Image (cartoon, helix red, strand yellow):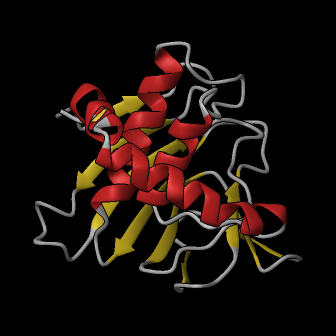
């Protein structure tokens, strides 16, 4: 399995330092290179915390719906389970940061590998959102990524779709293609 994956559309790079499997489930650790203006949407996780540490450049973190902070190299911030957050690059240069998930989360690791693989295969839009709602459901559910607002109401439907995809082998096909 590749340690480093690259999103060919948005150019982000993820290097897995330690996986959940390697740590006996204790931690998932990755270094991420994020392009200018890059980031992710506001979300929360139910089952793991994320500790962000800026390595090169400034890392923006939004916690809650309005509170933002900037981490300079060496500074750390931990987002506890159930806490709404997002990260972003507020600069005009690429940045690097470290993220540690505790406990480790294989689903998070697989979701990143799958989404970057789908992007490489032309199966996402320009923001790397899968064109297939089934693929989106699988990724959201396997990574324990929960979104506020309208998506909260769609989550039961997405969860059902993901369970069906698991039962009919679609999830395993994605894992076999992109995570091995």
Question: Looking at the picture, how far across and down is residue 165, in whole percent?
Answer: 40, 44
Q: Nearer the viewer, residue 11 or 146?
A: 146
Q: Nearer the viewer, residue 45 or 153?
A: 153
Q: Compared with residue 45, is residue 141 higher up or lower down, i.e. above or below?
A: above
Q: Is residue 71 visible?
A: no
Locate residue 81 relative to residue 72 in the image: left or right: left
Residue at x 39%, y 56% (from the top left corner): 108
Q: To which quarter of the image does residue 107 belong?
A: bottom left
Q: To which quarter of the image does residue 168 belong?
A: top left
Q: Nearer the viewer, residue 28 or 107?
A: 107
Most extreme residue toward the top is 122
Q: Quadrant of the N terminus?
A: top left
Residue at x 33%, y 48% (from the top left corner): 166
Question: Looking at the picture, how far across and down is residue 130, in whole percent?
Answer: 60, 31
Q: Is residue 28 visible?
A: yes
Q: Quadrant of the C terminus?
A: top left
Residue at x 48%, y 66% (from the top left corner): 144
Locate residue 143 relative to residue 79 in the image: left or right: left
Question: Looking at the picture, how far across and down is residue 155, in whole percent?
Answer: 64, 63
Locate residue 5 relative to residue 179 in the image: left or right: right
Total residue callouts: 0
Residue at x 64%, y 26% (from the top left corner): 131
Locate residue 156 relative to residue 23 in the image: left or right: right
Question: Looking at the picture, how far across and down is residue 24, in whole percent?
Answer: 10, 72
Most extreme residue toward the right is 66
Q: Compared with residue 173, is residue 166 higher up or lower down, i.e. above or below?
A: below
């Amino acid at each position: 399995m590749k340690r480093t994956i690259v999103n060919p559309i948005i150019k982000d790079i993820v290097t897995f330092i330690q996986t959940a499997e390697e740590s006996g489930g204790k931690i998932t650790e990755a270094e991420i290179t994020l392009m200018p203006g890059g980031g992710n949407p506001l979300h929360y996780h139910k089952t793991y915390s994320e500790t962000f540490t800026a390595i090169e450049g400034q890392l923006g973190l939004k916690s809650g719906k309005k509170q933002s902070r900037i981490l300079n190299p060496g500074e750390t911030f931990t987002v506890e389970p159930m806490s709404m957050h997002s990260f972003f690059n507020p600069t005009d240069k690429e940045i690097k940061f470290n993220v540690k998930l505790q406990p480790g989360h294989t689903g998070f690791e697989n979701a990143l590998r799958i989404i970057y693989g789908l992007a490489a295969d032309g199966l996402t839009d320009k923001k790397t959102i899968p064109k297939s709602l089934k693929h989106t459901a699988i990724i959201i559910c396997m990574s324990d990524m929960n979104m506020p607002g309208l998506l909260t109401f769609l989550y039961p439907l997405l969860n059902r779709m993901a369970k069906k995809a698991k039962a009919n082998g679609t999830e395993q096909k994605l894992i076999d293609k992109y995570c091995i």
